[in-house]
Amino acid sequence: MIEVTSHQAAYQRKLVHQANQIGKFFAHQPQPEAVANIADHLRKFWDPRMRTQILFHLENGGEGLDELPRHAIEKIASETTQD
Amino acid sequence: MALIQEVDYGTPEAHSAVTVTLTIDGQSVTVAEGTSVLRAATAAGIQIPRLCATDMLASFGSCRLCLVEIEGRAGTPASCTTPAANGMVVHTQTERLIRLRRAVMELYISDHPLDCLTCAANGNCELQTMAGAVGLREVRYGTEGANHLRLPKDTSNPYFQFDPAKCILCSRCVRACQEVQGTFALTIAGRGFGSVVSPGMEEPFLASECVSCGACVQACPTATLIEYSVLALGQPEHSVVTTCAYCGVGCAFKAEMRGQQVVRMVPYKDGKANHGHSCVKGRFAWGYATHPDRVLKPLMRATTADPWKEVSWDEAIARAASEFRRIQAQYGKGAIGGITSSRCTNEEAYLVQKLVRAVFGNNNTDTCARVCHSPTGYALSSTFGTSAGTQDFDSIEQCDVILLVGANPTDAHPVFGSRMKKRIREGAQLIVIDPRRIDLVRSPHVQAAVHLALRPGTNAAVLDAIAHVIVTEELVDEAFVRERCEIDSFARWAAFAAEERNAPEAVEAITGVPADLIRYAARLYATGGNAAIYYGLGVTEHSQGSTAVMALANLAMATGNIGRPGVGVNPLRGQNNVQGSCDMGSFPHEFPGYRHISRTDVREMFEKDWGVALDPEPGLRIPNMIDCALEGSFKGIYIQGEDIAQSDPDGQHIAAGLSAMECVVIQDLFLNETSRYAHIFLPGSTFLEKDGTFTNAERRIQRVRRVMTPRGGYQDWEVTQLLAQAMGYPMRYPHPAEIMDEIARLTPAFTGVSYAKLDSLGSIQWPCNEANPEGTRVMHVPGFVRGKGRFFVTEYIPTDERTGPRFPLLLTTGRILSQYNVGTQTRRTSNVQWHAEDRLEIHPHDAEQRGVREGAWVRLESRSGATTLRAHITERVAAGVVYTTFHHPETMANVVTTDYTDWATDCPEYKVTAVQVSPAAGSAGTLNAGRILEKHIRSQQP
Ligand code: SF4
Ligand code: SF4
Ligand code: SF4
Ligand code: FES
């Protein structure tokens, strides 16, 4: 578990909401394509510390994250470790 | 410098390819067919006396001063109403004409006060000039008989007076109000000798329908309608052409001056965006520039609990620089950022983002466009390949069907609103999609063909239903799609649109719009001829803002309504330089010219030019900056010309975020809501005090020219430059022209732009490059900028902001004509006479249920906060919907907006908030969450 402050927790909830919103836009696409597009969107438009926060959140169980954004964030995580 | 004298050709330009040749006073003249003899003569340098004719208006033929003789024709026809014809031989000056004109003039003057020497129009009065031109030497009729000399003045309008004693009944004002402005506020009341110009039902100007656009004042050839500023200061002695700093229409004005004092702002006929028209804001509401509230010396304080202290520029800049460097050393490079302003020039926005990227060393730059049109950028670049409107304003003249979505141009973009009305009067059909019955749905001589009064937040559902009709009724322009668009993306979209769940009947319960109206609108848009989309913040400021803009782009591509004049997809931009500030790389993820910062080729080009290494990762957007401030990783900000505490949503959250920062630097004209949280305040400069350029909603780059010395000592771009230097970066431009040269060097769409070219062409619509050396009127001809147009599936996803038992009504927000955004400027002018407070519009049914009476105070509450304001009961809003503007901080309408945002761009969902309304005792008990929170924060401080 990674310790989070209450501000971080609130922030992470907001990011989860946004990631889910992004997920919904791409939801009609076949899963691999949707996951790639969501990951691409997060990489292109989210500051690295936003991505770090959501990665933390995922490591802590990823509560509230829908399936597609969850996969997209996992994809980002795996690519980050590869780098 | 001299006074710019524009030629008045007497009648409007004729647009025919066929020409005719005639002889006027022995000179051969060739003009377009349809040109009047008066205009043909003026073009040849021959001045025919005239009074009722002016080239902004159709000819009228009432004064009989412009008489000419034409060989082979009997009598003396009026040259303003006589079209030039091949072989015509015209004489403008004969014994007979001289006699007739003097007689006409004598009649006019016999009922006109002879106080020329003390008249405010002395030296600039067409009546006076014409009396001279016709050689009037005596007036045989005395002024003792019946006359109009003692009629009372109407001084109700705060900017101009009406002195009927000086009126010659030429009717130019009445026609200007009809033809140019389209308001129909003036008539000639009475008959014969009793005729007088009258606003409305013989009421004072201020009480009438008049919107104070000034068109009548400009058209008046005498001192009857005249600006108070001219009465007070006298006639101007020089003028400079510049651009209005209020809205995205970008009207060109002549700033008419005496020394450094503005006498008046007169719309410039050569302005390609406004063609000589204006609205009350640009024309009259410039007094804020010299308002005593302006802060003219830098201010500083150690904590926000301390009082402000005036300091020198050196001290303020040095402190800002050292604080920013200290914060970066302590919390990391990414702990500071900057916000560019859509009110400032392109050059200024460019410098702020350069400061952030090159000097701060991160990409934490954002702009107030985040809160209005960021979805436009995202969606239009995804679909078409460029983040801008596709047409010029003139394109509307070739348009047959106007699809107006979530915009209220007669209030927010008035000069374009007038053009739209004119086109509708000429026969174009109008489809309005808006929760509220805006003026264009029905106003004098204008009526929408159909109004889809949808529930706030259901744009995507309505647009998908329109798509459904277009696809299933086979109204798609297949040839266009095949040739110009990505076929796979089209097939996917068409299959989606055709699904039964998108049928108008299926979404009726969601949108509240009767299915047959959607079907009618869809057919009209697809088959009514040239169809053009115009949209505003009612589309973008939603959690599905980007989706809805994509849905509009889909419709245009599917019906082939893009890539030629008269069609297209056109965002109506809010602030004067929203387009420009976005073009200039204000967003955290892209360089100027909309190129992603991760692109190595682009980054290397900037690195080479700027001499520093640049960060390839996107930075923080405004809401993220606030979140990170609370979370602890963002500590300092430089805000140029932006009041985020007032204009951004969820005021409490912003207030808390700003309070958590260690160095907030504001550069602005006035202390504002945001400066409550600031440590350093740097005086800003108005558009009258600076050189630069603005880019309007049609991508038109226009010059802003300095007419007075910056009152605080520096133009805004100079201040950014000082800050960069103090932080150790050599930013030294002698003039904004050099900044533009750098922009041109680094941005493909601007390659051909320079101040020299702007001076010679007047304005340039980007892209301006080798392929389009004079700029581009209409985009995506012959192909889309991205190659093939791309369709996107635009599934309707309801916002998470839902009504329920506690908050059963939907609040939506907007703006009105006389005020501008948060009102920082307009509230400091006489424009307050039209809009003294924000009011809550509520449907009679909802009002009755709650015991709310007209004009009574009500409490407006959402899950984010509450405020009180007065109610206005009206059927303009549907039952279940309430509406207010956000021009006055007292209302803090934003307290009741939430932090939901557009999925793609974080643009706040201003247009939908679940609220409850209940009667309140009065404004005294206002629960002003922003202020209370601030008090709380202050009480926590040492
Ligand atoms: S100011 Fe404009 S709206 Fe008012 S009467 Fe004159 S032309 Fe009409
Ligand atoms: S007010 Fe001016 S423009 Fe109007 S009729 Fe009188 S003189 Fe002509
Ligand atoms: S506010 Fe807009 S419409 Fe009005 S004068 Fe300025 S640019 Fe023109
Ligand atoms: S100018 Fe032609 S009739 Fe008045």
Image (cartoon, coloured by chain):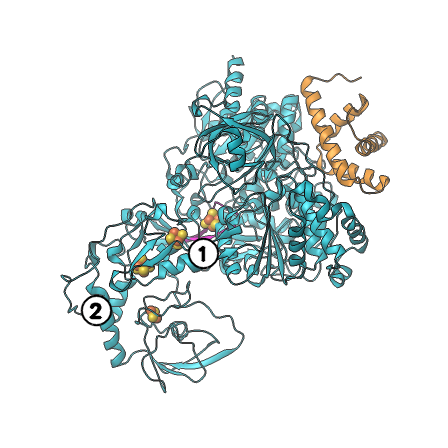
- Work out whether A71 lies above or below B445: above
- The answer to whether residue A14 is seen in the rendering is yes
Dot 1 lies on which element? loop
Q: B44 or B813: nearer the eye?
A: B813
Q: Which comes before the other along the chain, label 1 or label 2?
A: 2
In magenta stretch: residue B252: yes
Q: Amino acid at mark 2?
A: Glu
Label 2 CB sits under 8 Å from any ligand 4 atom: no
Magenta residues (range):
B240-253
Dot 2 lies on which element? helix
Q: Badge 2 local density, few (<14 within 10 Å), some, or many (20+)? A: many
The residue beneath circle 1 is B182
Q: Quadrant of residue B524?
A: bottom right
Q: Badge 1 local density, few (<14 within 10 Å), some, or many (20+)? A: many
What whole-number distance in Å separates the C-alpha atoms at marks 1 and 2? 34 Å
**Residue B755 x/y as whole percent:** 52, 54
Which color is chain B depicted in? cyan
- Asked whether, in this view, residue B848 is left or right of residue B461, the answer is left
Which color is chain A depicted in? orange
**Residue B375 x/y as whole percent:** 65, 42
Q: Amino acid at mark 1?
A: Gly
Q: Chain of mark 2?
A: B
